[in-house]
Amino acid sequence: MSILIILDTNLQPQTVIDTFESLLWVERYSDVGDFEIFTTVNDKMLQFLRSDYYIVREDSEHVMIIEDIKINSDSETGSIITVSGRSLESILDRRIIWNRTNIEGNLQNGILKLLNENVIEPSIYDRKIENFVFEASTDPRITSISASGQYEGEGLLETIKTLCDINGLGFLIKLEEGEFRFKLYKGEDRSYDQNENTYVEFTPKFDNLLNSNYEETKRSLKTVSLVVGEGESDVRQSTTVGGGVDLSRREVFTDASDLTRVIDGIELSIGEYNTYLEQRGREYLLENVFVELFDGEINTSVMYRFNEDFFIGDIVQIANEYGMESKSRVTEIIYSESTEGKDIYPTFVKI
């Protein structure tokens, strides 16, 4: 079984847990992960599994925070404790974007600005999260990305997630030497559309995809947005994002009247203001996309091993027994562990 190390709120090790009925451990590329431990109650569990304590797993760089504890008692079968929570990235969910903030240019610098103003060096000292550090990436696939946006009142976690999703990036908060280290990263392309990395394909014909589920839906798909900014009803500035013709065109209206043209007493040009409107439109379209998902159980003893041959965020080739094949990103890894053994279930989202 996996070895779990429990840390207190001061990040000091308290105990090791290596026996439980079941463990569900979920890691995600550009979102918060979660976990659940299910086991019988004993003094060790009650003493060390407490709200706000941290759980470190030896074979993972993701750290979890205990948020929920449930105890069900039964006079015949005994008492069962269920402990669950979310990954360390969830601490961003404890902050909003307090003041109107504009980002323009380099995406990584823009995210650093959001973190500086709301976590690392906020003007209100009580909002500061101690020991939070930004680890800048030198990956040109990240440093070359530009973005524009205007935010106020949005959740910090959701804003960073959206910016990452639009640009195909992941984010992680690691626990290193007592610091919460935030970093952006980008998965490698291991599909058949490239020649730099070794191909990775999951398919029944290779006996490495034991079972799979396929899902697609266009129910909420929108392909073009009319984005309307501030101003009076008949003179509001607007722009269009996306496209499509005939029946392939699916339109939606985005009200961006909260975006202002005057920033720190300086009025933006029409072109500059349009960049903010376009970003809002792209964010809205991202919430209404064509969804195509593969998920399934992989055989990690055949051909490819997770965290050796491929990693979360990587792009791989997926094909099921019905000829459905796609270039897909590994967006989620679910570890399911019990007294009967361990299984790994990835989720693949088509690129």
Image (cartoon, rainbow, N blue to C red):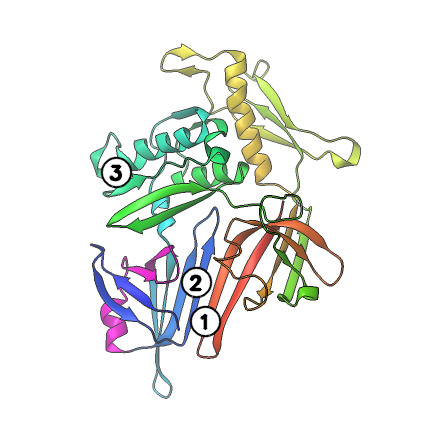
| Residue 347 spot, x, y in % from top left | 57, 56
- In magenta segment, residue 47: yes
Residue with the mark numbered 2: 25
| Residue 215 spot, x, y in % from top left | 66, 56
Residue with the mark numbered 1: 337
Disc 2: CA contacts within 10 A as few (<14), some (14-19) or many (>=20):
many
Which amino acid does the dot numbered 1 rest on?
A: Glu
Q: Is residue 231 visible?
A: no
Which amino acid does the dot numbered 2 rest on?
A: Trp
Residue at 48%, 79% (x, y): give it: 340
Disc 1 vs disc 2: Cβ atoms closer than 8 Å?
yes
Secondary structure beneath dot 2 equals strand
| Residue 337 spot, x, y in % from top left | 45, 71
The magenta segment: 42-67
Secondary structure beneath dot 3 equals helix
Q: Which residue ends up furthest to the bottom in the rendered image?
A: 76
Residue 127, which numbered label?
3
Judged by depth in the image, the label closer to the viewer, 3 or 2, is: 2
Earlier in the chain: of badge 3 and badge 1, it is 3
Q: Residue 201 versus residue 84: which sits nearer the camera?
A: 201
Disc 3: CA contacts within 10 A as few (<14), some (14-19) or many (>=20):
some
Secondary structure beneath dot 1 equals strand
Disc 1: CA contacts within 10 A as few (<14), some (14-19) or many (>=20):
some
Q: CA distance from mark 1 to mark 2?
A: 8 Å
- In magenta segment, residue 101: no
Earlier in the chain: of badge 1 and badge 2, it is 2
